[in-house]
Amino acid sequence: MSAALLEDALVAAAPGPPRTRRRAHGHRLLGLLVPLLLLGAWYVVSSQELLSTRLLPSPGTVATALGDFFAGDSTTTLAGVVPFTGAGFEHLGASLYRCGVSWLLAVAVGTVVGLLLGLSQLARDLLDPLLNALRAVPLFAWLPLALIWFGLGEGAARAIIFVGALWPVLVAVSDAVGRVPTAHVETARMLGTPRRWLWRRVYLPSALPEVVTGLRLSLTLAWTCVIVGELSGTDRGVGAMMSAARETGRTEQVVVGIVVFATVGLVADLLLRAATARWVRWSRA
Amino acid sequence: MVAGVTGVLEASGLTKAFGELLVLDGVDLQARAGQVLSVLGPSGCGKSTLLRVLAGFEEPTSGAVLLDGVRLTGPSPDRGMVAQAGGLFPWLTLRDNLAFGPVASRRSPAQVAAVVDELLTATGLDGFADALPKQLSGGMRQRASIAQVLANRPPVLLLDEPFGALDAQTRLRMHEWLRALLAERPTTVLLVTHDVEEALLLGDRLCLLSGRPAKIVEELPVPFGVHRGRGVLADPDFVRLKAAVLERVLAA
């Protein structure tokens, strides 16, 4: 390969100029293409009856079930059986509330412990090994203990969501706070900031962009953990509905649950990004 | 000395060692109230360490820093320091950066706003109050960094190569701007630099440091008027003095 060719290859491999807003919008539209193609493939597979409807219900069946879930007539069922029709908002509300409460608690605890770890060498020496070991415990390994401690239902579900959501916040805050440039801290001290206000005036704002990334990861994980928590036997919630649907062989209702989880997860992340956009504006190129 | 102005900054027998490494070896100097003292030394001689000790970021191994005869420990709004990279907080707008010091010293919102508005005008950055530091040019950022420190009205200003990262023309403009600014608000300034021209343009007096470990090898007055501008660069006396001082820095 000649030197000129090599240079061309290197230029081609180098990252291009920063993407403009317009291109970002174009990418977002492209992001719809693959889901639409998959939907088409799904339609073809089910209309040709290549798979049994028990394994893969048709898009139409799922759409009808989705409509029934949110807008159908609420039917009374036997005690202990989770209603499906018309109960969508009740299930979704229960899941959202459960997730929100646990996530907010995880954010509060993660931020405080993360700040402590980031600011104090003593706290790091005391807690780092323990926290790193606990962090390595798979989420499902906490489930039996949560069930023993809190019993089947709400308490165990919240505990599982809390544990899942805690680590990303804790690690992001302690990491980011530990990496705040000394120069910022010195400038703030020189300008007269009392030590006890440094965390509020320097450490936290400087760490915010990374913390926001932690918050996003944490929220997604919390939402993922909702299903794990709800499998522990809550009577309301999207996960509980799916569990009941599986037991009664209603695959289309299981798929409705998946669609609801995916949509809410996406929307929650978009909302969180919008809400925190002004905290991270300064760090974006 | 200008009547009523305080802010005599003294270093007496300052020694600083990092482990075995002796960086400052008994530095004695005095910055007179309301004057600019340029401290000139070869690269790597410990100029920045000297300034960090004076600012209170580093404890001297021995010796003392005195402000108006009172011994100092730790950083304080009385000694504003501006480093080469500037001190602006990247997450705050220019207005909030200028307000940082006054807010930290619990001034009333009205007082803070008045100080900030005045400094925005003095720095010629009126139109950029809501800009983030990354949206400003290098020269604007350094003017803002100096203004951020001046917002506390410190009697002493410590400058660590504040214009070192700027191009030659911007630097010359900054020198004239700083002279005009200081003429309006008498402040004792200690300017650390390796640039002979900058030391002579801004300083009322000049201290020469030796190579590491640093000590003062010579102190001389700078015999040009308070209102010197870039015109003085062509003054034969200035050219001669600059050459002589450069000779000594290189020999130090």
Image: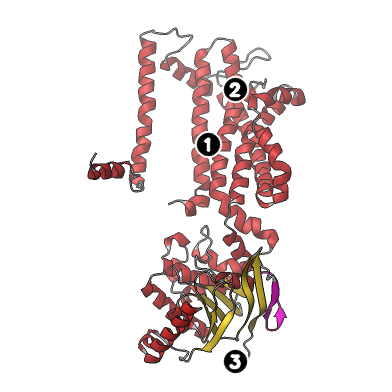
> From where the camera sits, is residue A71 visible?
no
The residue sitting at 43% across, 76% down in the picture is B174
Residue under label 3: B1
| Residue B241 placement: quadrant | bottom left
Q: Secondary structure at mark 2?
A: helix
**Relative height, residue B45 to residue B180 (above, below):** above
For the residue pair B163 and A170, the one nearer the viewer reads as B163
Callout 2: residue from which chain?
A
Tell me how far mark 1 sits from mark 3, CA to CA: 65 Å
- The answer to whether one can see residue B95 in this image is yes
Please tell me whether residue A163 belongs to the stretch shown in magenta. no
**Residue shown at 44% from the left, 66% from the top:** B128
Question: Hey, what amino acid is under mark 2?
Answer: Gly
In the visual, does B237 lie left or right of A109?
left
Chain identifier of the residue bearing label 1 in the image:
A
Do marks 1 and 3 share a subunit? Answer: no
Q: Is A159 positioned to the left or the right of A1 in the image?
A: right
Foreground: disc 1 or disc 3: 3
User: On what subunit does the disc labeled 3 rest?
Assistant: B
**Is B70 part of what is drawn in magenta?**
yes
Amino acid type at mark 1: Ala
Give whichever of A208, B142 is nearer the camera: B142
Q: Which residues are magenta?
A: B62-77
Q: Residue at x 46, y 67 (%)?
A: B141
Name the residue tied to disc 2: A239
Residue A268's tag is: 1
Dot placed on the residue nearer the N-terminal end, 2 or 1: 2
The answer for how far apart the CA atoms under marks 3 and 2 are is 80 Å
